Every structure is written in C-alpha cells, then in structure tokens.
Amino acid sequence: MLIGYARCSSSADDERDQRDQLRVLGVGDNSIHVDHGLTGTDRPRPALTEALTAVSARDTLVVTSLDRLARSVADLSAIATDLQARDVLLMFDGTAHDPKEPIGRTVFAMLSTTFAEFESGLIRLRTMEGNARRKAAGGFAGRKPILDPAQQSELYDQHQRGEYSIAELAKRFNLSQPGIYKYLAREKTQRNAPPFSADH
C-alpha cells in the first residue's frame, strides 16, 4: 500500500502541486495526509502521525522530497529509524527505498547523517513560510519535561522492542510526538558513537 504525506506552506498552489505529484507516484486521494505550516520546530504535525500510523510492514511512505518529510536532520533520522524498524519502504524524489535490500539499507543509513542538500531545502521551506506563520502557530502548551539519560535509554529500548507506538510513548513519557523523535535520534547517536579512548 502507498501512503502519501505532504507538508505544505500556506499557499494553495503548494498543496495542489504536492497532491498532484503524489497522485502521479501512485498514491490514491484517500491515502494522502497533509500538514500545513513549514516553520516552528515543535509545531504539531497530526497528518504525519496519521501517515506513520497508517503504514505497516512492506507498505511504502511516499513524499515528494525529504525536506517535506522532516524539519531537521535529527527528525529525519528518528523517522527513518522508525520506518526501518517496522520494515516500511520510503519513497522520495520518485524512488522507493527498501530497508531489506542492500541499496535501501545504505540509503536508510545515510538518512541519519547531515548533508547539505537536505539542510538547504529546510532553510528554503522555512523562508517560504516566514515569520507570520511562526506567530500564528500557537497552541503549544508550555515546556515539556526533559528526560534524564536513564529515561531516554528506556524510551529508546521500548521503541526498539516495539512495545508501544509513538503516540503511546508520548503519553507514557509526557512528551510531544516530535519530542519523542528527538530523544530517539539523540539516544541512537549516543549509542552509535565510538567509545572514548584515553590514549587518543
């Protein structure tokens, strides 16, 4: 099954263009999930949650480009980690990447690294949206509690074991769903970091 996701600016043309592109890629109208607003690190993305919930093993999440899927490299890394763990394919720029195939595994691994094209795309999108959209975002209820290292590790382990969905983890740890993705990415980076040696 193909599930489409679009993150659009306030322009009606932007949404129409992305919907058209997703249709060309084979996504049905009823399977396209759209969030509006490109700026704001902690802005809720209910349509992304719906799209990630809708995909299961061997389904394909379809986006027109990576900068429409995530808002930072850490965000992208966490989403890619979640998709790979659930055996979900990811299509962007018209090409589907299968985490079970060698090339697909390489692509998923690369998604957790910083590369200039993705970052420049994010900057371009944020510029499109502008300060007016940031002011209009609102609705974010205060600071979220910060997890200590033990809680962060526990969160990561529970996610890796598939015990809870992202939405369930958000409730258990009293975090926003974007916050969950941030902590997952942070813990993954820490665990993959080479051990420190006093000899170097």
Image (cartoon, helix red, strand yellow):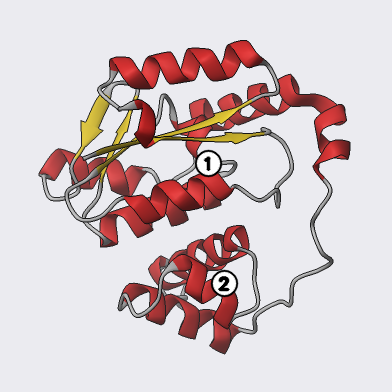
Q: Residue at x 50, y 12 (%)?
A: 17
Determine whether the residue tagged by mark 1 lies in a helix, strand or loop.
Answer: loop
Q: Residue at x 87, y 28 (%)?
A: 132
Give the percent coordinates (x, y) of residue 140: 79, 57
Residue 146 is left or right of residue 87, and the answer is right
Q: In which quarter of the view is residue 162 placed?
A: bottom left
Q: Residue placed farthest to the bottom in the image?
A: 150
Task: Identify which amino acid the numbered label 1 is placed on.
Answer: Ala
**Is residue 198 visible to the viewer in this orientation of the structure?**
no
Residue 36 is left or right of residue 27, and the answer is right
Residue situated in front as seen by the camera: 159 or 150: 159
The residue tagged 1 is 70
Q: Residue at x 49, y 61 (%)?
A: 185
The residue tagged 2 is 170
**Is residue 107 visible to the viewer in this orientation of the structure?**
yes
Give the percent coordinates (x, y) of residue 14: 58, 16
Residue 91 is left or right of residue 192, and the answer is left
Q: CA–CA distance between discs 1 and 2? A: 18 Å
Task: Identify which amino acid the numbered label 2 is placed on.
Answer: Ala
Circles 1 and 2, Cβ within 8 Å, touching? The answer is: no
Residue situated in front as seen by the camera: 147 or 102: 147
Residue 111 is left or right of residue 196, and the answer is left
Whether 190 is drawn above or below 157: the answer is: above
Give the percent coordinates (x, y) of residue 181: 53, 61
Q: Residue placed farthest to the left in the image?
A: 101
Q: Depth-wise, is mark 1 or mark 2 nearer the camera?
A: 2
Give the percent coordinates (x, y) of residue 3: 32, 38
